[in-house]
Image: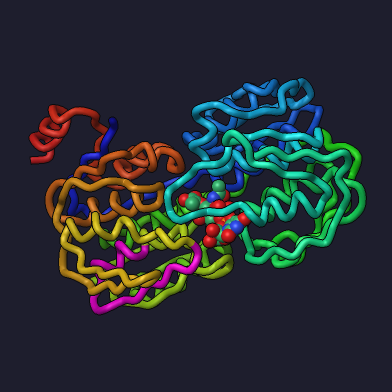
Amino acid sequence: MEQYVIKGGNPLAGEVEIGGAKNAALGIVAAAIMADETVMIENLPDVQDINVLLQAVECIGAIVNRVDAHTVKINGSHIGNLCVDNEYIKKIRGSYYLVGALLGKYKHAEVALPGGCNIGSRPIDQHIKGFEALGATVDIEYGLFIAEAQNLKGSHIFLDMASVGATINIMLASVLAEGRTIIENAAREPHVVDVANFLNSMGANIKGAGTDVIRIKGVSSLHKTEYSIIPDQIEAGTFMFAAAATKGDIMIKNVIPKHLEAAVAKLIEMGCEVEEFDDAMRVVASRRLKQTHLKTLTYPGFPTDMQPQISTTLALSKGTSIVTESIFENRFKYVDELVRMGAKITVEGNTAIIEGVDKLTGARVNALDLRAGASLVIAGLAAEGITVVEDIIYIQRGYERFDEKLRSLGGQIEKVSTEKEIQKFKLMVG
Ligand code: EPU
């Protein structure tokens, strides 16, 4: 099992380049198989979740040609198998986009039920409601999500909550359906817009992505395209909070500043200096930061995917902060790990009360999910002494070369897999 071993205490400083958005890429790779021509996707993040999804589409007959680490060509004209079921696909959340894509294109899909990070119960009722409204029948049997239809017909769908996954999945299923589909209370996240833009570049007719009403006019087929995925705003936010927590100075390059407004507002409230450029952002924390309160919300509110990172930063900031998690009920499990490092946090229901402490101290902690894992790495970089983060497989699902990027900013972090390597690191850092 790989681990990160970290010696904390160095303010992070320098420049870091952000990769393509993982959660957009999951929808886009699934959408790519809907064309019978070759689609080229650039700025693809080279992370575990995407690699698993690429393997899955290859297994059902799509031709996948990895041009380089961040570019892939996909041709979906030879798909012969509409059942996606292997031991890896169950582990990723984005696998459910293959239901929308295969149902939309072939009117039949069988996909192993999605896994993903253990951050709450994560129901899929809104996806099912959307597919059924389009005329499909949906069953869950033998661990498979099975959807089929004679014909898909556009429909008017009201989502009970603005679900990212359901919005993208319904878009995928409806782009080739007959007539018009309207999705009300649609998710407005940047990755929803990116998937819609990608589908439109293949000839789909989707309007309103980025607002809460998306209108889709069915077309008869999709064609080839070349498309570059937007930068990952959560990776960018993670480095912004890493700068804040370590009292550092980081220039974060290849970002869309508009997507980071909620995080920037909080960093400024906490006392950071944030400088915005066309496609970069500089975050400087020259003094001890102060408390703030926040509630996670759908876009453009403060994202749940940055909640562990800001909470870790607040654990070291002056005063008492209150953080309310309104999207996923289980997203405070990492708090126990932070407490082991000296944080003073109590969780009551979906609220964390964070009493800022002067310092954290290194400990052996577990990355319980992707973002929690990243936040423990931030904690380790800010803490006194040595931290070992176990189960980094979760972090690798969504962060590309995380340790390498942090090292380039002066972070003392190494990927190790044995106790001997940990001892060697300790001797090296003194
Ligand atoms: N929900 C339902 N029924 C549904 C769908 C969602 O009740 O049918 C609920 C969920 O339980 C949750 C809320 O609605 O309480 C929002 O869930 P959403 O569907 O928006 O989340 P998701 O599609 O499962 C994606 C990202 C998550 C990110 C959320 C929120 C992917 C693969 N995952 O999940 O990303 O936290 O949107 O923005 O795109 C991550 O990257 O670390 C991550 C967990």
- Report whether residue 382 is seen: yes
Who is closer to the viewer here, 169 or 428?
Answer: 169
The answer to whether 345 is drawn above or below residue 366 in the figure is: below
In which quadrant is the C terminus drawn? top left
- Report whether residue 224 is seen: no
In the image, residue 320 lies in the stretch drawn in magenta: yes
Where's residue 221, x and y in %?
87, 37
In the image, residue 120 lies in the stretch drawn in magenta: no
Who is closer to the viewer here, 248 or 148?
Answer: 148
Where's residue 69, x and y in %?
53, 29
Who is closer to the viewer here, 393 or 357?
Answer: 393
* Residue appearing at x 33%, y 57% in the figure: 333
Where's residue 87, x and y in %?
50, 27
* Residue appearing at x 74%, y 54% in the figure: 130
Q: Quadrant of residue 419?
A: top left
Q: Which residues are magenta?
A: 310-327
Q: Quadrant of residue 319?
A: bottom left
Who is closer to the viewer here, 159 or 16?
Answer: 159
Q: Quadrant of residue 420?
A: top left
In terms of image quarters, where does ligand 1 lie?
A: bottom right
* Residue appearing at x 27%, y 72% in the figure: 354
In which quadrant is the N terminus drawn? top left
* Residue appearing at x 77%, y 51% in the figure: 132
The answer to whether 181 is drawn above or below residue 368 in the figure is: below
